[in-house]
Image (cartoon, rainbow, N blue to C red):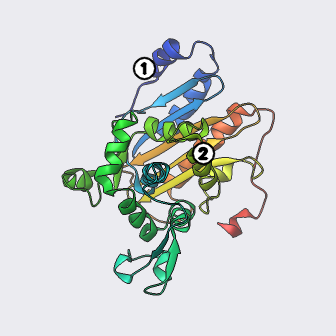
């Protein structure tokens, strides 16, 4: 799966002639990936210049909780078409519980909850009980996959609770994607082109209030607006982020797989990689504004 520096340079020569300094960025990212014990995929695109760096950007990786971005998109498609209302009131029942630390799982049997709150829980806190309910409301994995295909996302798919995708679930888990496709989902939201302008606006708001801010987001100043979604399973850590940076927006997605370090501590090698890549990108695109987390932030991680 590793891509050679020569291949990357040829890619840049063909597609990024306007930005020779991307060779420097490519070198830094390639060097960082080489030090990681596992597979890595990275896709970075500066949206103002349309320059990109790609490292295994079209290889399939597990989505983990990043699959909640396409679930949100397909859910909003149904709302846009009038099949659901964002304010619909629903009834939670305990048979929906997905064991874990979900907030929704603490609700009493029969308690009322609105659809907009389910979407909030799915994206902001990555609540799995809410997410599986949203997947059902979006039409199930089969409908979400059809929506993805119709919108040009040919490799991103929901596997869990989706008939016919059992072998893919065994290999990738809940969902599968490529770094390029996951990043481009956020780029479409930013451009107000996913579902509709109004739906994209609301999706941008949802992905702009993320509870899990200790990895890639921690390498970006807190006053910079972002959209993001994170994912983690034992052998894979991932994050997709769109940064509204002073010198132009950029989007990136980093996904690992088969990583040796399967711990759940803050210093897990996958989490460190996410932070390092985000830091490298900020330093590259925003050279005039170096950023280091204040001393003592470890107390909040």
Please identify the quarter of the rendering in which residue 64 is found: bottom left
Q: Residues within 10 Å of mark 2 (few under 14, many from 20)?
A: some
Indicate the secondary structure of the residue bearing disc 2. helix
Residue 252 visible somewhere in the drawing: yes
Query: Which quadrant is the C terminus positioned in?
Result: bottom right
Q: Mark 2 against mark 1, which lies toward the viewer?
A: 2
List x then y, in percent, for residue 169: 26, 55
Residue 37 visible somewhere in the drawing: no
Indicate the secondary structure of the residue bearing disc 1. helix
List x then y, in percent, for residue 157: 33, 46
Q: Is residue 213 left or right of residue 223?
A: left
Circle nearer the N terminus (2, 1): 1
Q: Is residue 93 above or below residue 52?
A: below
- Residue 7 numbered mark, or none: 1
Residue most extreme to the front = 82
Q: Is there CB contact under 8 Å for labels 2 and 1?
A: no
Mark 2 to mark 1: distance in Å? 40 Å
User: Label 2 belongs to which residue?
Assistant: 198
- Residue 18 numbered mark, or none: none
User: 108 or 290: nearer the eye?
Assistant: 108
List x then y, in percent, for residue 106: 49, 83
Q: Is residue 139 left or right of residue 192?
A: left
Q: Is residue 216 left or right of residue 88?
A: right
């Amino acid at each position: 799966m590793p891509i050679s520096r020569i291949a990357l340079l040829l890619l840049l020569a063909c597609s990024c002639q306007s930005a020779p300094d991307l060779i420097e960025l490519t070198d830094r990212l390639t060097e960082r990936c080489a030090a990681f014990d596992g597979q890595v995929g990275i896709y970075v695109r500066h949206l103002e210049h349309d320059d990109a760096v790609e490292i295994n950007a079209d290889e399939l990786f597990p989505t983990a909780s990043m699959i909640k971005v396409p679930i949100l998109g397909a859910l909003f498609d149904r709302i846009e078409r009038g099949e659901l209302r964002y304010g619909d009131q629903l009834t939670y029942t305990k048979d929906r519980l997905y064991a874990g630390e979900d907030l929704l799982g603490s609700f009493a049997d029969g308690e009322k909850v609105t659809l907009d709150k389910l979407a909030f829980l799915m994206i902001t806190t990555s609540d799995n009980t809410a997410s599986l309910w949203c997947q059902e409301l979006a039409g199930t994995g089969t409908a979400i996959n059809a929506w993805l295909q119709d919108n040009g996302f040919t490799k991103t798919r929901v596997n869990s609770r989706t008939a016919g995708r059992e072998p893919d679930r065994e290999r990738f888990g809940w969902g599968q994607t490529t770094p390029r496709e996951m990043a481009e989902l956020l780029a479409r939201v930013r451009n107000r082109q996913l579902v509709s302008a109004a739906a994209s606006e609301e999706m941008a708001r949802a992905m702009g209030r993320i509870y899990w801010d200790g990895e890639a987001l921690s390498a970006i100043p807190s006053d910079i607006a972002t959209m993001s979604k994170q994912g983690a399973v034992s052998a894979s850590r991932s994050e997709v982020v769109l940064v509204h940076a002073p010198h132009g927006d950029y989007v990136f997605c980093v996904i690992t797989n088969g990583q040796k370090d399967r711990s759940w501590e803050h210093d897990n090698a996958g989490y460190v990689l996410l932070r390092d890549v985000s830091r490298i990108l900020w330093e590259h695109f925003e050279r005039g504004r170096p950023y280091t987390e204040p001393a003592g932030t470890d107390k909040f991680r």
